[in-house]
Amino acid sequence: MLGFQPDDEQKLIRDTVAEFAREQLRPLAHEADESGVFPTSVAQQAWELGLVQSTIPEAYGGVGAESSAVTGSLICEELAWGDLSLTLHMLSPQLVTYPVIMLGTHEQKAQILGDYVGPHFTAGTAAVMEPRFGFDLNELTTTAVQHNGEFVLNGAKCFVPLAAEAAHLLVYARRDNGIAAFLLPQDTPGLTIGEREKNMGLKAVATYELSLDNCRIPASSQLQGDIQPVFNRSRVALSAMAVGVARAAYEYAREYAKERRAFGTAIAQKQAIAFMLAEMAMEVDAARLLVWEAAWKIDTGADATREACLAKNYAATMVLKVADNAVQILGGHGYIRDHPVERWLRNGRGFATFEGLAMI
Amino acid sequence: MIDFSLSPAIEKNRDMIHAVADGTMRPISREYDEREHEKPTEWLNMMWEASKNLISFGDGKKKASGKAEAVERHLSERTVRSAVLIEELSWGDVGLYLSIPHSALGGAAVAAAGTPEQKERFLSRFRDGEPKWGAMAITEPGCGSDSAALTTTAVQDGDQWVINGTKIFCTSGLMAAEKSEGFVVVWATVDKSAGRAGIKAFVVEHHTPGMTVAKVEDKMGIRASDTAMLVFEDCRIPLDNVLGQAEVKQSTTGFKGVMATFDATRPLVAASALGVARAAVDYVRETFAAEGITIRYVTPQTKLTTLERDFMDMEANLQAARLLTWRAAWMLDQGIQNNLEASMAKAKAGSMVTQVTQKAVELLGPLGYSRKTLLEKWMRDAKISDIYEGTQQINLLIIARRILGYSSQELN
Ligand SMILES: Cc1cc2nc3c(=O)[nH]c(=O)nc-3n(C[C@H](O)[C@H](O)[C@H](O)COP(=O)(O)OP(=O)(O)OC[C@H]3O[C@@H](n4cnc5c(N)ncnc54)[C@H](O)[C@@H]3O)c2cc1C
Ligand SMILES: Cc1cc2nc3c(=O)[nH]c(=O)nc-3n(C[C@H](O)[C@H](O)[C@H](O)COP(=O)(O)OP(=O)(O)OC[C@H]3O[C@@H](n4cnc5c(N)ncnc54)[C@H](O)[C@@H]3O)c2cc1C
């Protein structure tokens, strides 16, 4: 039956995460963006919230909570509302844990998951995107060729978060005519982690280029099964984060517009501004509902590829428009880095580009 | 719970109504677009019988039979049900849907502002007998969006109200006033100096002397639905035909009472926009399929063809509007205040259907522009969704006031 309210447990989780985002992430976001340094203490605090450990099965030392994409999208929205860079850093372990939980063999689970149930934050990462024009998830140029019971990987990757410190690395590559994911140890010969990237946004999360030059890994390193559901979860996670960033920008601009006066009234009393805000509110809600629906469909076990893709495209377009409007509403002040709206615009711009950067 | 599934009962009704839309509306759709001002009498009679138990504008109409439990369930999701069914009917033909004998907006006003006695007196007639229509007349030649500026007057004279003024653009006004035993809910002021507080809604019964249909408009679209000008000249109605309370309070609660009608009707107007948009989207999808064009959802935007990008945009915007609509309808059923969400649904659906149908005509080129198919008609039909029940701008104003906490004086 139709319903638009999170259940009690989801509300509790959402409220806890929202408080964390408000109290811990927001105050650190500006400085982290300016310095490009991730405040490590916050990763530990986030770790103690148990978001990563909770969905790891009990057999592998986790809590074994049911992994719900709807609950995940509530969490992602709230965290990204706090700060996107910090969120991507904090949730990086899930880039490994989710695909392994979903597709891994018992051996793979036993090998990997135990590292993510300890008392300290442990980074993980996945290499999805490639540094080239016309990047297409379905036509990866990184290849995996089977040879004598091994896979040989070749190619280049970019936007790999926390690659330098990740305990485990999942590389997506083209195998025969499909995509497959492979677990690579950090010390695999031929694997080179390049310099930290410099991007328009996401400045506080360390992302890297990787090169894979005849990397040989055992055949047992491949995750088995259909990879599409993994990407659908990623699409939903990123879309929910886009909603969070957009909501942050909308709320900030709304409060500013009520305070800022011009021509004898608050600028919010001018229709040109008020209507922008109305559309921002409406579009944030519209995108959130599309994200929830895609997440809900994932949770029912049905194929949600179409819904997840539509939600992601919608949310990526929406966040850019909303963040741009927020900068516009602040006028010249929006362009100055003392206010966070320009950061949300820089971060928000990324969603149309990002693939596989987050997972729920 | 966050859940996007419809109940099996609603799905069953939806499939039934879809068959009606496909089998009985589509075949006569073009005909009653071209034969404006004529009515498909047989079809209307059939729909009167078929739909009177299904669609609710919040008029408190109960399903005739069934266990108490079933009735309860039926009522607990009646706005969602109406939204789903109205989408189907509007997918069939929105002009024909609007012309179905029903208490419609008039009924919604009675439900929102009437006393229990009035609800019984005015709405029970829609349960049986001959087909009947309800209508609501707010708009005047001199004011539309600014309904508080209306000039039609109601003056008490003994045990009657005497109404004078001119109303325009009244949907089903002809059918409600002269062609059935229906009624028109007329908004008029009892005290011009009191502003909003002086505005009341009056039920004027069919064939009341002093009420005349002066004109039926020729329109761009929704031509199967009559849009009437009603002139009131010393039109006398009983004292207890004023909805709610007659006395003028120095607050605007009376006006707010009638405005609350829109919280119930806007999601349903949005639902009808969804149906028109879906008709266009379905048509484009079928044409693509026939031409061997597939939509590659997982392909990055930068590598898609313009056709694919446009089509995916249409689909996503339609679904976004649908979810906003369902949310507003669901809130009403749950008894949650939905003023903000109803306007969001209406604003989004109104602009969405306008853009989606215009884009569909563009994508199909000469086929889209031709009157051999229905696409050009849907584009003409679509535009009204962005105008009536509060224009796009009026709904944005309502949203803005709600999110900013402004009164209508602070933001207008
Ligand atoms: C990099 C930079 C360089 C600059 N260089 C100079 C310079 O050399 N010299 C100088 O004097 N200034 C300069 N400016 C200031 C710039 O001209 C102002 O920022 C600009 O005029 C907007 O004013 P504001 O920032 O106070 O915004 P506000 O006036 O506060 O406007 C805020 C928002 O409200 C909107 N708004 C305001 N009034 C209305 C209205 N009546 N109806 C509808 N919407 C309204 C605006 O469009 C804007 O979206 C510079 C600004 C920047 C960022
Ligand atoms: C086919 C059809 C059926 C209809 N059915 C009914 C019916 O059953 N009953 C009924 O009472 N009415 C009905 N209407 C009338 C409809 O509700 C009005 O046309 C509508 O409310 C707009 O009013 P208006 O046409 O006077 O436009 P106006 O109010 O004159 O508006 C003109 C333009 O100005 C804009 N505008 C107005 N005020 C503001 C503002 N404050 N800020 C920004 N922009 C503003 C509007 O958005 C619009 O774009 C119907 C109309 C049509 C065409």
Image (cartoon, rainbow, N blue to C red):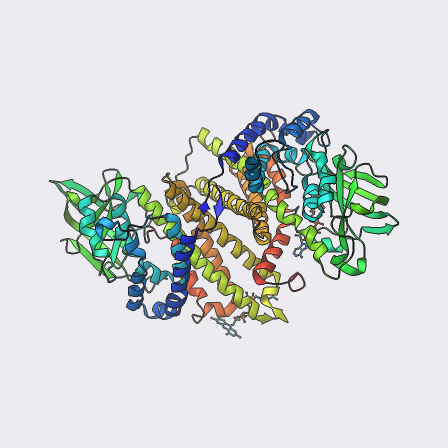
Measured along the vertical axis of the image, is residue B211 above or below residue A78? above
Location of residue A173 (image quadrant): top left
Measured along the vertical axis of the image, is residue B132 above or below residue A271? above
Location of residue B37 (image quadrant): top right
The residue at 60%/53% (across/down) is B339
> Residue A172 placed where, x, y %?
25, 47
Measured along the vertical axis of the image, is residue A179 above or below residue A323? above
Measured along the vertical axis of the image, is residue B352 above or below residue A82? above
* Ligand 1 occupies quarter: bottom right
Residue A349 visible in rendering: no
Query: Quick one: A26 or B53, which is closer to the camera?
Result: B53
Q: Say left or right for B26 vs A244.
A: right
> Residue B298 placed where, x, y %?
37, 42
Q: Say left or right for B219 vs A145.
A: right
> Residue A333 placed where, x, y %?
49, 70
Residue at the extreme front of the image, as rendered: B68
Query: Quick one: B204 or B355, which is closer to the camera?
Result: B204
Query: Quick one: A217 or B329, which is closer to the camera?
Result: B329
Tally the marks: 0
Q: Say left or right for A236 vs B265.
A: left
> Residue B177 placed where, x, y %?
78, 37
Residue at the extreme left of the image, as rendered: A148
Residue B96 visible in rendering: yes
The residue at 39%/51% (across/down) is A71
Location of residue B13 (image quadrant): top right
